[in-house]
Amino acid sequence: MFSKILIANRGEIACRVAATAKRMGVRTVAVYSDADRGAKHVAVCDEAVYLGGSAPKDSYLKGDAIIAIAKQTGAEAIHPGYGFLSENADFAQACQDAGIAFIGPSAAAIRAMGGKSESKRLMEAAGVPLIPGYHGDNQDAAFLKEKADNIGYPVLIKASAGGGGKGMRIVEDSNNFSDLLDSCRREAITSFGDDQVLIEKYALKPRHIEIQVFGDSHGNYVHLFERDCSVQRRHQKVLEEAPAPGVDEAMRKAMGDAAINAARAVDYVGAGTVEFIVEQRAGEMSFYFMEMNTRLQVEHPVSEAITGVDLVEWQLLVAAGQALPKTQDELSINGHALEARICAENPDNDFLPATGTLFTYQKPVHSAFNISDVRIDDGVRAGDVISPFYDSMIAKLIVHAPTRAQALAKMDRALAATRIVGLPTNVAFLRYVINTDSFRQPNLDTALIEREADELFNQHRLELSTLVATAIVQQLAAESIAANADSHYKNDPFNRHSGFRAYTDYMRSFSLVYDEKNYIAYISDWHNMFTKPALDSSEDTSCFKLAIKPNTADDITIKDDSLDEVKPDYTGHISYNSSDAHNHILWVDGKRINAQSWEHKESVYVFTDSGRDQIKLIDVMAYAGEDSAAVGSLKSPMPGQVVAFKVAVGDSVKQGEPLAVIEAMKIEHTISAPADGVVAELLFAPGDLVADGDELLRIDAVANEA
């Protein structure tokens, strides 16, 4: 076995490989870019060496530099993870030439499976089922159209060198073929530098099912059963599970045998995945070879969960020349596993990737990088930045249970307990998906998300009353803690002298913005011994009356401290107990709710078992005692680069006037003045990199004229 390996990757997969290596007594070397100097994978490895700039081409794609670092540190092997150089045949060959083991297949196997057309010719020769199509070298447009007409529509045009959902077009009829062929070729040349395409029959109600295979240098091959990866957005996987629902033993054996034949055809050594497209027609399923990924897959933990095998351990053993630890007869399926990819993205905005700081990052009770009922594999920590340079995945959440129904319930609970604040994520969206009828039945195919769109997008699963009450309770709890109130009344907003009224209720108002609508909420004391409900026996429980109404320009002015004048859309009685500013037990309309909340960038993020949402809350009283001359500082809304400042120190600015321009992910964002003032200080210079929340400049208010 190797004594030291270099991990030529970053983030979650680098941490994953390092965890298994540590258990095996193998030392690890990390490489890192400018953006990853303080990254988790740097901290968990035994050694770390600087590689280059933040952009992948300046760091993680520099094969020569990585091999030089391996030699410098005495690493005997390189694990490429997935992505970056993992399927680069030239890099695998360069490792071999340098006398360093490549923990993966040979360069020849990578080349053989890397081109979609060539791999399909190999598979046809090996007897692996292929979907009807054309995979040849003749790329004449008229010839390709003729082939498509003969195959029958719909057909799929695919870039031969493609991947990741790019370079693909679905053609519904002959009239659109030429235009879509041109479009596919343009994207292929831009993305892969190769405009060769292949034509395939587009399967009806297709499922994406793949087989995990393993080979060693002694001629042994096994498969570790199948995974279903049908739930996708933009041709990229969202949820994976093993085993695949609806696959019987006969189909499982046939797919497994085909996958092993595919691996044997290229003398494959190491972990690989043979991907099949499965057509569902008249209650029957037919499978066809799609491609082979010559590396470890993101979704490998579900296969580990149902087989009890550490696939990274097997990778290291096989790369060191050892035989596979088990034969096919010794492998079996135990229970059911699901994996959810938690990503920094906005599902309601076409899954636009997001950048920012993990202001809050709380996970359910779990293990990390080893087989268990609830497992989370990640490469980030609270306070880390999701940068614009790399993949948007934050973590992988994996659950395992005896049955699929139990695994679904466990996944729902685990997602409900996941708390991320600081940037948009798909956590709520994932809960919506696993609770759709299509996923639960299961009625699976690659169009599931589009089919269930009404249940998945622009959802608000929390009642407005719960959201408003929690946001107000957080502010009241934070104020009480800050004021060091007597512990007997520490959660009570009406225990201080400011809350006393001799003949009327004390009332307080809050302005709110929710779902792009303005609201105003009023709370008043509810301590009358004859009306306070016995909702909780704790003497530390506090209560208030709550009223909520739309906040419009013609709202009446409250002339006394009575909610009777408000004429709200909602009124109710709230009872609550907060252990701190973030953890609350509330009774809203008599219903007990466990809630957590965090305030970040003027919004309060509320989490309950029913879901999560956010609301902006402004309490006029909270600002009444502040220095009205201090407009404050302006902060970068995301990690990026300062393009320009539009002002200089000493300039007078008006509310809404542009102050600075930040660029992130090739998009420019303008920072505007929140109020009139004078520029007091510029804290960065054009060209500087800034983190989410960094102060860019300060402005002071214009003094009031006498």
Image (cartoon, rainbow, N blue to C red):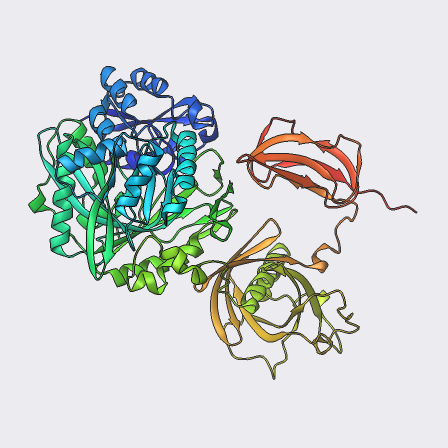
Residue 536: tell me if it is visible.
no
Q: Is residue 88 or residue 79 the one in the foreground?
A: 88
Horizontally, is 398 left or right of 551 in the view? Answer: left
Q: Is residue 512 or residue 449 the one in the foreground?
A: 449
Q: Residue furthest bottom?
A: 530
- Split into 4 quadrants, where in the image is the N terminus? top left
Horizontally, is 674 left or right of 290 in the view? Answer: right
Write the residue at 51% across / 42% down.
357
x then y, percent, for residue 559: 80, 73
Horizontally, is 47 left or right of 539 in the view? Answer: left
Q: Is residue 64 or residue 407 the one in the foreground?
A: 64
Is 329 placed above or below 579 here? above
x then y, percent, for residue 143: 31, 35
* Image quadrant assignment for residue 22: top left
Write the residue at 60% across / 82% down.
531
Residue 194: tell me if it is visible.
yes
Q: Residue furthest right?
A: 706
x then y, percent, for residue 257: 11, 44
Write the residue at 37% across / 63% down.
436
Is 198 placed above or below 564 here? above
